[in-house]
Amino acid sequence: MKLCAIALSLLISIGGRAYCGPGQGADGQGSDSRDTPQASTQSPHGTRADYVLGPGDQITLSVEGLDENYSEKIFRIDGSGDVSLPLIGRIHAAGNTSGSLEVALQTKLEPILKHPQVVVTVGSFGSQPVSVLGSVTNPGIFQLQGRKTLFDVLSMAGGLAPEAGYVVRVTRPVENGKIPLPNIQVDVGSRASVASIRVKDIIGIPKASDNIEILPGDTVSVPKSGVVYAVGSVVKPGAFSLDENESLSALQVVSLAEGLLPTSSTSKAKIIRIVPNTPNRVEIPVNLSQLMAGKAPDVQLQAQDILFVPSSKAKKAGLRTLDVIAQAAGYTVVYGR
């Protein structure tokens, strides 16, 4: 399994906590001014103290002296952010944490009870969905339940699958603001900003700038790894995965193909590459003899590239002659016994 998948698996096995390098907290988040102690604490009632309620969330209430009205009942926050409660009526709950809603409910109940004590617990999270798609262990829709980084969200999905590629794409609706990274793209049709983030920049020692906070409504997708091909006079022709790499060098591909055949014409190899957005291909000459001798810089193959190593007619003819000589020598030895 790839290192990045192992790292995420280890993270999950120890409860989602790991040292992530300078500038990173134990949960993989940046240590900027927004990360206050309150942001990682639990309320006494089991609900994250910083979780902001929203439409779709379901809550339960415990009110001392009014258990018959609230005990074992579930109340859902509707699409407008309101919730209807016995003896109180409709009250706006979206935008409150469980703690601030408790204070508001206590104020509403003061005409009925003396010093009312209210406990709000989130029974089901439904207002902060994020979609995680593609090459992850458990793709699906997850509830953020507080501030989560890209690394955290990938962990929630079980980590990267073995076939995951070298980038993670984050898509954010424009109404939620642009993704805070350089070189983002804006898809006018879907009204969203799109960022491509290298897996290596968020696994191991994540950069604070790349390990961005994921917002409700974001989509995180992990494309499958690309492949390169080796064909012709190699020992093991076939397709080879880039894994978490953006590219592989020509010599790496030769190594994955278990080397060259004796008949290969190493000076006349070529890379066949698709021209983006067209059905056409270009040929890039590669002199493998010079690469192996260290007399020329190695050449990088991108996803879908083909390394073609032709055969040498002269070498083929020479090998056929050697075969004939070897066979004749074998007959002579057998005959002379």
Image: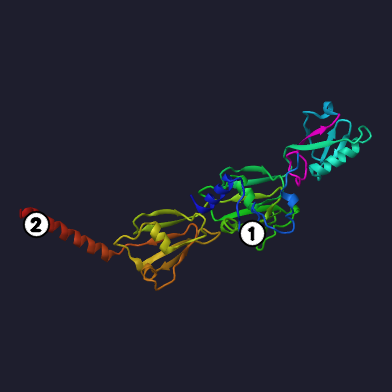
Q: Is residue 61 left or right of residue 312?
A: right
Mark 1 burial class by Cα count in 10 Å: few <14, some 14-19, many 20+: many
Segment colored magenta: 45-65
Q: Position of residue 2 (x, y in %)?
A: 50, 52
Closer to the camera in the image, 90 or 7: 7
Residue type at mark 1: give it. Asp
Instruction: Identify the disc placed on residue 310.
Output: none
Is the magenta region chiefly helix, strand or loop?
A: loop
Under circle 2, the secondary element is: helix
Vertical position of residue 54 compared to residue 235: above or below = above
Q: Quadrant of residue 71?
A: top right
Is residue 41 left or right of 291 when viewed as pictured? right
Of residues 199 and 185, the one drawn nearer to the viewer in this rendering = 199
Residue on which the image places disc 1: 210
Query: On the image, numbered disc 2 is attached to which residue?
Result: 332
CA distance for labels 1 and 2: 72 Å
Amino acid type assigned to the residue bearing label 2 in the image: Thr
Give percent across and percent down for residue 239.
Answer: 43, 53
